[in-house]
Image (cartoon, rainbow, N blue to C red):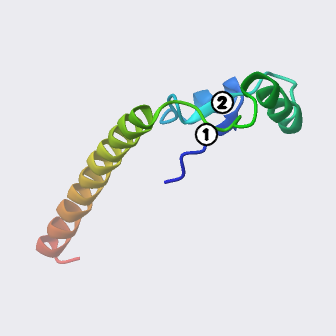
Amino acid sequence: MARVPVLVTQRELRAYSYLKPPAFVLRQAGESEMQAIARLQREHGDSPYTTGSTADWQAYEEELYRTNTRSLEKALHLDTRRLHYGREAGW
């Protein structure tokens, strides 16, 4: 996983609920991507894409992996139950 935050608007942030700090940089409404990058360069100097410490990123990634694992386990469990039921029902 790349540790480069995505550039998002508030609207996009609401749509992608898994994005949490430090994985995003908020872009102002009406601000183009280039304007946002220029603003970040003015605010943060040579490294506008670096947000959060290594520990912050590790915590974010671990939480994301746990969430993905739970979702996958749940999906596989549901599919396994459907397959099992289908065989017994003679489908």
Amino acid identity at mark 1 = Pro
Measured as percent of width and height from the top left, residue 22 is found at 52, 31
Instruction: Using the rendered view, name the quadrant where residue 34 is placed.
Output: top right
Residue 79 is left or right of residue 34, and the answer is: left
Residue at horizontal 58 percent and vertical 32 percent from the top: 51
Relative to residue 8, is residue 76 depicted above or below? below
Measured as percent of width and height from the top left, residue 74 is found at 25, 50
Instruction: Using the rendered view, name the quadrant where residue 56 is placed.
Output: top left
Residue 75 is left or right of residue 2, and the answer is: left
Q: What secondary structure is found at the residue carrying circle 1?
A: loop
49 or 33: nearer the viewer: 49
Residue at horizontal 75 percent and vertical 36 percent from the top: 46
Circle 1 sits on which residue?
A: 5
Circle 2 sits on which residue?
A: 25
Measured as percent of width and height from the top left, residue 43 is found at 76, 22
Relative to residue 52, is residue 86 depicted above or below? below
